[in-house]
Amino acid sequence: MRKPIETRCIHGNSDFSFQDANKAVSFPIYQTATFGHIGVGQSTGYDYTRVQNPTRERLEETVSALEGACDTVAFSTGMAAVSACFELFGAGDHIICSADLYGGATRLLQTIGQKNGLAVDFVDTTDIAQILARINPHTKALYIETPSNPMMNVTDLHACAKIAKENALLLIVDNTFLSPYLQNPIELGADIVIHSGTKFLSGHNDTLSGFLSCASQELAEQVRMIAKTTGGILAPFDCWLMLRGIKTLSIRMERQQENALQVARWLEAHPKISKVYYAGLPEHPGYEINRKQARGAGSMISFRTDSVETARRVLEKVKMITFAESLGGTESLITYPVLQTHNDVPEAMRARLGITETLLRLSVGLEHVDDIIADLAQALEE
């Protein structure tokens, strides 16, 4: 029987038999670039850290245990993982993506992806009819973010998995916003799950990482070959930081989403806030779908102010909340997507998605919720 996810955060799928010679409770950092051979044609199983390292292996096994994956590969950043994912495709291949997508992924597809001959359609994947309308003989994959960044759109993964299976497509899901604690796309039919591990998996705003978790051995072998060849792997010390962060994933996610729901409700009632985007609010259009496929709504909120002046005033006046990019850490962060995470997205596309100068994105942290609300209240005051 599979262990509860809280236990898997700390021990992965291990049988608790790991014992360091010195009885170390924390898995050791194998800070080495290379490993000696025990004889000609003989190996300990580790040869060179770009290919594999015991600390990275432990981390990858832990993330696989959380996602229910066949195998996981750890990369140096979230974008390194996304880039490796698109190396699975070649010139002439067509991919259907969520239109509301992390700006770095959009930039990658519209620059390097285009250079490499990929054809991409950005569609509203909450509308299944739009997905079906774009499938053609060259379509190879559906690439989904749910909830999306930054508009918090929720895509039905069960429906997407059905479409993917019927059309022999790969279903790729970026699960960064909810983490494996709240959502497991592989169980819903996904072939590949992507994480920017920098965010909730790390949880402390202190290291970069990315992950590709695969549902099949065949895909996993392809991803490992790409990682080995392109070299964007995660270093041993960063792997150790990730292992340390994941141990508290369950309690962090519970408290952060508890805080987020209270903050979202408070924002809804504020006269200077015209719209709140949070999948945990019953009035959110994706609320029921999210409840069906996830165990919570996470702690990411976007909201629209009554004016550009109000938005900029909030960014300049917050004190405890930090005006910064990134998300998912213990500290609350507020971001201005139009100038930060989505600055490289074409202006017309931003406008169509609703990423305007009045939109702010809030990553709710672990501070006392009264302090988070008080900071937002004083920042909204004229």
Image (tube, rainbow, N blue to C red):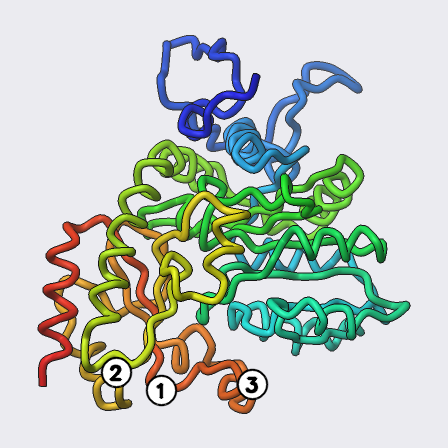
Report which residue position mark 3 lands on. 349
Amino acid type, label 2: Ala
Query: Quarter holding the N terminus?
Result: top right
Is residue 343 found left or right of 260 in the rendered image? Answer: right
Q: Quadrant of residue 171?
A: bottom right
Q: Earlier in the sequence, mark 2 or mark 3?
A: 2
Query: Mark 3 and mark 2 in contact (Cβ < 8 Å)?
Result: no
Relative to 134, does residue 256 appear above or below in the rendering?
above
Is residue 85 found left or right of 368 in the rendered image? Answer: right
Q: Which mark is residue 357?
A: 1
What secondary structure is marked by label 1?
A: loop
Amino acid type, label 1: Glu
Query: Mark 2 and mark 1 in contact (Cβ < 8 Å)?
Result: yes
Query: Quarter holding the C terminus?
Result: bottom left
Is residue 160 found left or right of 299 in the rendered image? Answer: right
Q: Quadrant of residue 145?
A: bottom right
| Mark 1–mark 2 distance (CA, rounded to whole Å) | 7 Å
| Residue at (74% x, 76% y) in the render | 115
